[in-house]
Image (tube, grey):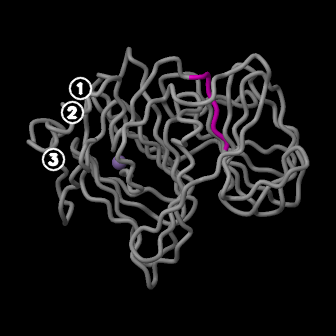
């Protein structure tokens, strides 16, 4: 995914509500944009009031859209540095290609994890005649590994944990004595919940983690308050459980992690530490001096917006 909702200014992770000793929650409205004629993208992160949750620094929820009579996603080659892209379709199929030579179709319930490190480029296309619905997240890489060689891993099988009548996909991290194979570089968790029946549950939380809860289908009741798909609910550190009332067929994304201690700058598809790095990466992309080439994609590579 590229920055389809244009954010011309550089976003600084320092500029949000400071963490306090007392646990608190924040309701953050997602921003919506229409891509092409019909595809709705809802951006939950970064948000004006919350740039990161753990090392999670970007969360786009796209669709659902029936592609029978609609164009879906078709994102030409574009570069990334300093982050991992984490793609999780709820429905449909997306074809990933990258400058390492990867060509990988991802289906519902699977994860594509691309670690950009010092630099990679990729393209993403939804495949026709299916539904398109899913999320893409970015994870900021800690300074110690952010210049690593890039890599791409496809995870076809994600562990599922049953909690009462709720199926929990363990997308990354650890939960209920299970460990996800999806490789990240800081303490994080990613869960997707789907209720088989109208259900209530008490979800254990790690008090050293902060969390974000985003509805992907339907709505959920949290602490007697209904949260819908236009809201990301942020929970600060210091909380040990979350009481949920989940209607049948609702689907919920939960992300969490230890607050990311490094200040990051996010601009276009780059996660950096200072503006000079962003300028360098932009020039390298424009001049074809880094990021390699994506082979086999029919179409143009993306041009960066103008840096303010
Ligand atoms: Mn991308």
Q: Where is residue 141 in the image (x, y as percent from the top left)?
A: 42, 26
Q: Would residue 127 appear left or right of 55 to someone viewing this image? A: left
Residue 293's mark? 3
Q: Is label 2 in contact with label 3 (beta carbons under 8 Å)? A: no
Q: What segment is highlighted magenta in the picture?
A: 254-259
Question: Residues under labels 3 and 1: Cα distance?
Answer: 23 Å
Q: Where is residue 25 in the image (x, y as percent from the top left)?
A: 76, 35
* Position of residue 135 in the picture relative to residue 265 (left or right): right
User: Which residue is the site of mark 2?
Assistant: 279
* Element type at mark 3: loop
User: Is residue 258 located in the magenta-colored stretch of the structure?
Assistant: yes
Task: Measure the C-alpha gap from mark 2 to mark 3.
Answer: 20 Å
Residue at 42% x, 41% y: name it: 85
Q: Name the residue under label 1.
A: 276
Residue lying at the far front in this picture: please name it. 308
Examine the rendered structure and indicate whether residue 243 appears above or below residue 299.
above
Q: Where is residue 179 in the image (x, y as percent from the top left)?
A: 63, 29
């Amino acid at each position: 995914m590229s920055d389809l909702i244009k954010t011309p200014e550089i976003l600084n992770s320092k500029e949000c509500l400071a963490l306090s000793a007392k646990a608190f929650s924040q309701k953050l409205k997602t921003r919506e944009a229409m891509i092409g004629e019909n595809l709705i993208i809802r951006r939950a992160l970064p948000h004006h009031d919350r740039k990161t949750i753990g090392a999670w620094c970007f969360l786009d929820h796209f669709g659902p859209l029936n592609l029978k009579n609609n164009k879906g996603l078709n994102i030409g080659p574009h570069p990334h540095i300093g982050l991992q892209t984490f793609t999780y379709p709820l429905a449909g199929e997306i074809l990933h290609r990258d400058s390492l030579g990867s060509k990988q179709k991802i289906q519902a319930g699977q994860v594509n994890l691309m670690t950009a490190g010092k630099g990679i480029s990729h393209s993403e296309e939804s495949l026709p005649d299916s539904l398109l619905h899913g999320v893409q997240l970015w994870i900021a890489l800690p300074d110690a590994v952010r210049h690593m060689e890039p890599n791409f891993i496809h995870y076809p099988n994600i562990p599922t944990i049953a909690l009462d009548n709720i199926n929990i996909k363990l997308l990354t991290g650890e939960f209920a004595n299970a460990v996800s194979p999806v490789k990240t570089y800081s303490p994080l968790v990613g869960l997707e919940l789907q209720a088989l029946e109208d259900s209530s549950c008490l979800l254990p939380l790690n008090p050293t983690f902060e969390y974000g809860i985003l509805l992907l289908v339907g709505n959920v009741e949290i602490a007697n308050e209904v949260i819908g798909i236009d809201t990301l609910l942020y929970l600060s550190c210091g909380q040990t459980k979350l009481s949920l009332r989940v209607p049948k067929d609702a689907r919920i994304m939960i992300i969490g992690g230890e607050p990311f201690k490094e200040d990051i700058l996010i601009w276009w598809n780059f996660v950096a530490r200072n503006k000079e790095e962003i300028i360098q990466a932009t020039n390298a992309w424009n001049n074809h001096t880094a990021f390699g080439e994506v082979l086999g994609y029919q179409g143009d590579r993306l041009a960066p917006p103008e840096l303010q």
